Image (cartoon, rainbow, N blue to C red):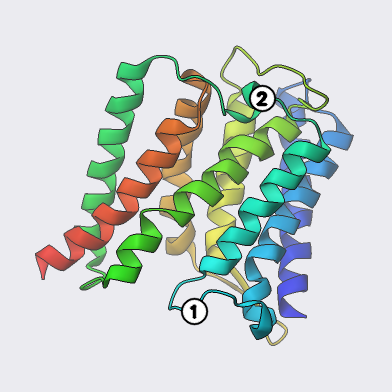
Amino acid sequence: MDVLTLSLILAATAFLLGLLAKIVDKRILVTSAVLFAIYLALDDFVTGLPNLFKALDLIPGDWNWTGKLFSLVLSAVVIFALKLSRDAVGLHKQEHSRIAWIGIALFVVWGTCLGLLFKPGMPNAETLAFQATMPGLAEEIACRGIAPAILLGLMNRKPGVEDIPWSVIFATSVMFGIWHSLSFSGGSLGFDIMSGLFPFIGSIPGGWLRFKTKSLFAPILGHALANVAFHLAGWLYV
């Protein structure tokens, strides 16, 4: 029940952010904001299913491998159902390769600095394997690929946009931060601002890279390497 309640809270928050983004970007429709909210709530719900039903936790381990796989399956279903083009989602041939690689390098620096700041301790092999794959893939496809495309109304094979939709980047970045910081347990809502602040900050350049390069390649790889750098830097510091 707590998982469902949290997803509904996230849906309401996403809808409100979609409406706020609509004030700035007239391409955003109320129906797009509704679909945006539903998708992000569903993504949160399916990601949390292994914690809700232990029988669905198909891959044992300390990290939520199964939940991230469910998120990726949902992404594929949504892309197919809404007829989102590769261009609209960011599964497009990358442009501005130099900018992409500079952005990826800066993400590594960012993750290293956060690791030195928070010192997460020695990571095991599973932690490094998970951080190098699942968050970057599942979260970037959802929050930097599908969610912006839905909010911009790029369904039914519409091509991607040529500009940098800053209101959409900001809305998805805020949602990304809230998703990392919000919790609901035993009827009590919790909010850890530090857990959401740094994902929010990192989402701004991540969103810009996605639209500047027309591709999710840099955000996905940058996210993955930043996560690995975070854990390795904290371990080496110790």
Quadrant where the C terminus sits is bottom left
The reply to whether residue 205 is visible in this rendering is no
Q: Residue furthest bottom?
A: 186
Secondary structure category for the residue under label 2 = helix
Against 70, is 199 above or below? above
Near-viewer residue (83 or 7)? 83
Q: Looking at numbered disc 1 in the image, what kind of residue is underneath it? A: Pro
Against 106, is 111 above or below? below
Mark 1 is surrounded, within 10 Å at the Cα level, by few (under 14), some (14 to 19) or many (20 or more) other residues, namely few
Q: Disc 1 marks which residue?
A: 60
The quarter of the picture where residue 19 lies is top right
Q: Where does residue 198 sit, x and y in percent of width and height?
A: 41, 52
Q: Are marks 2 and 1 in contact (CB under 8 Å)?
A: no
Q: Where does residue 141 sit, x and y in percent of width and height?
A: 57, 42
Q: Looking at numbered disc 2 in the image, what kind of residue is underneath it? A: Ala
Question: Tag 1 or tag 2, which sits nearer the N-term?
Answer: 1
Task: Point out the frontmost of discs 2 and 1.
Answer: 1
The quarter of the picture where residue 160 lies is top right
The reply to whether residue 172 is visible in this rendering is yes
Residue located at (77% from left, 72% from top): 5
Give the CA separation, mark 2 to mark 1: 35 Å
In screen coordinates, is 18 left or right of 98?
A: right
Residue located at (76% from left, 19% from top): 158
Q: Where does residue 222 sit, x and y in percent of width and height?
A: 36, 40
Tell me, for residue 171, which label it has, or none: none
Against 11, is 211 above or below? above
Near-viewer residue (126 or 101)? 126
In screen coordinates, is 91 left or right of 226?
A: right
Q: Where does residue 17 sit, x and y in percent of width and height?
A: 71, 43
Q: Disc 2 marks which residue?
A: 88
Residue located at (72% from left, 79% from top): 2
